Amino acid sequence: MFVTQTGRPLSRNHVHETFKRLVTRAGLPESTRIHDLRHAMATLWLSQGEPVKVVSERLGHSRGSTTMDIYAHALPGLQAEAADRMDAWFTDLLPTDPSEPEK
């Protein structure tokens, strides 16, 4: 996955040590792993409204349900937001004054 400028593979220790230096420089916890970056990106994508299908494909998951099983915690407010949108749709359709004609 990681190679030198000449295409030779980097050693696992080199990648690990370089990553740890970057983690320290970024002020992240020492326990941060490369895999944590993948998890953070997927969580961010989903929380910002990226479609599950797109995130699933980017992660290499064969099914969106796999992605949702792992990352559903990133979407805790979706049900409430959907209910709020539906409420707003119906509220907009109802007349505010009973003497007004329906839309």
Image (cartoon, rainbow, N blue to C red):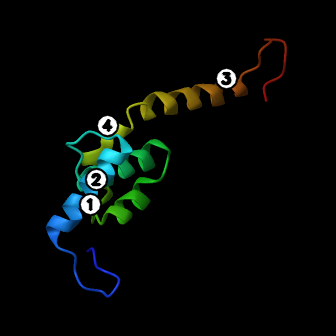
Distance from disc 1 to disc 2, alpha carbons, whole Å, reads 5 Å
Distance from disc 4 to disc 1, alpha carbons, whole Å, reads 31 Å
* Residue annotated with mark 4: 73
| Amino acid on which the number 2 mark rests in the picture | Arg
| Amino acid on which the number 3 mark rests in the picture | Thr
| Amino acid on which the number 1 mark rests in the picture | Thr
Give yes or no for contact between labels 4 and 3 (Cβ–Cβ under 8 Å).
Answer: no
* Residue annotated with mark 2: 21
Vertical side of 80 occupied by 32: above or below: below
Check disc 2: other Cα within 10 Å, few if <14, some if 14-19, many if 20+: few
Residue ID at (78%, 25%)? 102
Check disc 4: other Cα within 10 Å, few if <14, some if 14-19, many if 20+: few
Instruction: Residue 13: give x, y in percent of width and height.
Output: 15, 65
Between disc 4 and disc 1, whose residue precedes? 1
* Discs 4/1, front: 1
Judged from the image, the secondary structure of the residue bearing numbered disc 2 is: helix
Judged from the image, the secondary structure of the residue bearing numbered disc 1 is: helix
Identify the mark at residue 91; answer none if there is no mark.
3
* Discs 4/3, front: 4
Between disc 4 and disc 3, whose residue precedes? 4
Frontmost residue, 47 versus 81: 47
Instruction: Residue 34: give x, y in percent of width and height.
Output: 25, 55
Identify the mark at residue 18; answer none if there is no mark.
1
Residue ID at (32%, 62%)? 59
Residue ID at (33%, 53%)? 22
Distance from disc 3 to disc 1, alpha carbons, whole Å, reads 56 Å
- Can you say which quadrant of the picture contains the N terminus? bottom left
